[in-house]
Amino acid sequence: MSSEDLRGAPVGRRIVLGMLGLGAAGVAVGAAAQQKVNTALAPIGELDQVLPGAGGFRFYSVVDEVERRTPRDYRLKVGGMVDRPRTFTFAELQKSLPQTQMTRDFQCVTGWRVEDVAWAGVALPDLLDAVGVRAGARAVLFRSFDGAYTESLTMEQARRRDVLVATGMLGGPVTHDHGGPVRLYVAPMYAYKSLKWLGEIEVADRVVPGYWERRGYDIDAWVGRSNGRTDEPT
Ligand SMILES: Nc1nc2c(c(=O)[nH]1)N[C@H]1C(S)=C(S)[C@@H](COP(=O)(O)O)O[C@H]1N2
Ligand SMILES: [Mo]
């Protein structure tokens, strides 16, 4: 683990700098302590949510309790600067719209990464085409039905085919803890862009900084491009 992995976590950086100040003593703490340190480096608000998850995932939520929605209850509202605002059922997302699958890594800005995760769902450009994006739209905003978490992408980013409205993950449904029944998956960016419990999509004229971005994370979340980070944690 290097401090490189941990940039973007405002609390984390202070702790890393503190450790560097320890010099040899800090080094002597060794590998065993690193998992613990890493946990301490989770952003404020995630601290008590950091649990070891299946296959290397940690389950994150900025709120204590998220209402459970089943595929039957689930609705995705899509509106804003579109020609045909509408609400999609889970079945429509999983059957009526074109389906996209991909196997890609999932990397949190705090340093953990899960390789080769299978994802399935609707590529965001296909969903945008289904509602018709109006002239002048420059961004796509996402809201979680957890009532707190938000994200956004520029229209150019949202048009990428590796951005998914995901109905499947790891070969099955997206579990509640992973943000199901439907979450966002933004393959080329740090996982904080991959909003869980997706409730609403709004096409807009500008990007609005998301939950963590208002708390110090880069709006530019490209893995390997932002602030000299690399996508190969050491
Ligand atoms: N609604 C919501 N989405 C979220 C988060 C969150 O706290 N709430 N955390 C983000 C962060 S920082 C990460 S690393 C991933 C974690 O996804 P996981 O819980 O499926 O591992 O979800 C992202 N999406
Ligand atoms: Mo994260």
Image (tube, grey):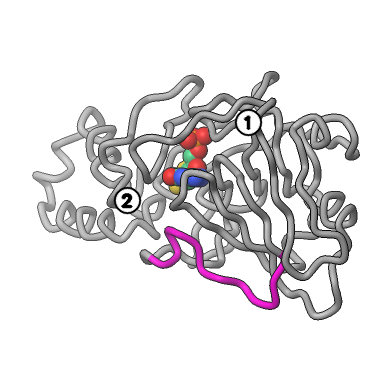
- Pick the residue in front: 95 or 125: 95
Instruction: Give coordinates of residue 192: x percent, y percent.
Output: 50, 50
Relative to 108, is 160 above or below?
below
- Circle 2 crowding by C-alpha within 10 Å: few under 14, some 14–19, many from 20: many
Residue closer to the observer: 184 or 69: 69
Q: Is 2 left or right of 134, judged from the image as shown?
A: left
Which image quadrant is residue 79 in?
Answer: bottom right
Q: Residue at x 39, y 55 (%)?
A: 4
Is residue 21 in the magenta section?
no
Q: Is mark 2 within 8 Å of ligand 1?
A: yes
Q: Where residue 2 appears, x then y in whole percent?
A: 35, 48
- In the picture, measured across the screen, residue 33 lies left or right of residue 24, that is right
Q: Measure how far apart labels 1 and 2 are at the Cα level.
A: 25 Å
Figure check: 132 above or below 100: below
Residue at 56% of width from left, 66% of height from top?
220
Which span of residues is magenta-colored? Answer: 203-214
Q: Is residue 216 left or right of residue 156?
A: left
